[in-house]
Amino acid sequence: MTAVLSHAHAPSSDPAHQSDPPALDDPTAAALHLVTGQPAVDLPAARRAVRDLLTALGQDPLSQHLRDTPRRVASAFAELLTPVPYAFTTFPNDEAYDGLVLVRDIGFTSLCEHHLLPFSGVAHIGYLPDQRIVGLSKFARTVDTFARRLQVQERLTQQIAGWVHDQLGPRGVGVVLEAEHQCMSLRGARANGSRTVTSALLGALRDDPRTREEFLALTRHR
């Protein structure tokens, strides 16, 4: 994961902007917005479903090698579909930093809702601060939260951008996702190595051509 600060005023030297926020009683922190998880997974029902699937596939779920597979598969899906609650904490933009902030190459894995196969890749999130800034690790947690549900990449991209915009109130937000979908590489077209790129731009990152180009250029830079 890479963080990039660009142009205009120098960034704040406050270390809270670069790492996890301070204690919850920090008077500079905004009211916390607790991000909650999805409905709980019914593990007994999931285990029964996996057992039935194995039988339907012509396998013996009582064999020595498959006996514990329903439990393992149910637990794996529960982990993939259960976000970890966190607080999206913001801080005053005391230095009036007005340049682009970009966190690049945030790794993620989600589940395709059409085939229940993973798609994995990286997310790039940028924003133009207004009155407040955010601890940069919260972008990684935001990506993880929305990725831990049955998804399509287009919706995931929009959900991340909308959440950041609503919680932070910046002048602009940009999100780019690049991912390889196993439902495309392991089956069907078997297009191994192909990547899908989606973007969501809000505010000045959509409306200002120069700012939009700066953001997109930085996401392409390696």
Image: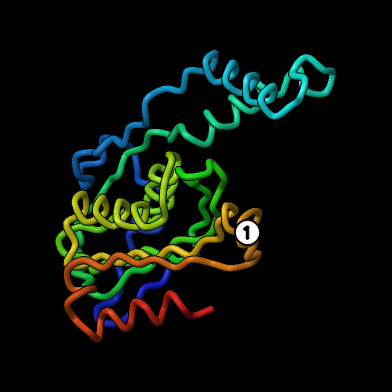
Tally the marks.
Answer: 1
Which residue is depicted at the point 61% across and 62% down?
189
Provide residue 116's location: percent of width, then percent of height.
Answer: 53, 41
Relative to 91, is 4 on the left or the right?
right
Q: Quick check: 156 above or below 1?
A: above
Which residue is depicted at the point 59% across and 25% down?
75
Provide residue 173's location: percent of width, then percent of height.
Answer: 25, 65
Kind of element beneath mark 1: helix
Disc 1 crowd, CA 10 A, few/some/many (<14, 14-19, 20+): some
Quadrant containing the C terminus in the rendered view: bottom right
Relative to 42, is 94 on the left or the right?
left
Q: Residue furthest bottom?
A: 210
Provide residue 57's location: percent of width, then percent of height.
Answer: 69, 29
Residue hosting label 1: 185
Q: Nearer the viewer, residue 54 or 3?
A: 54
Relative to 100, is 132 on the left or the right?
left
Instruction: Tell me how the rendering is colored.
Output: rainbow
Amino acid type shown at disc 1:
Ser
Q: Quick check: 210 above or below 21?
A: below
Provide residue 172's location: percent of width, then percent of height.
Answer: 21, 67
Q: Nearer the viewer, residue 152 or 190?
A: 190
Which residue is depicted at the point 54% across and 52% down?
119
Q: Quick check: 106 above or below 116?
A: below
Which residue is depicted at the point 45% across and 43% down?
113
Q: Nearer the viewer, residue 97 or 115?
A: 115
Q: Quadrant of residue 97?
A: bottom left
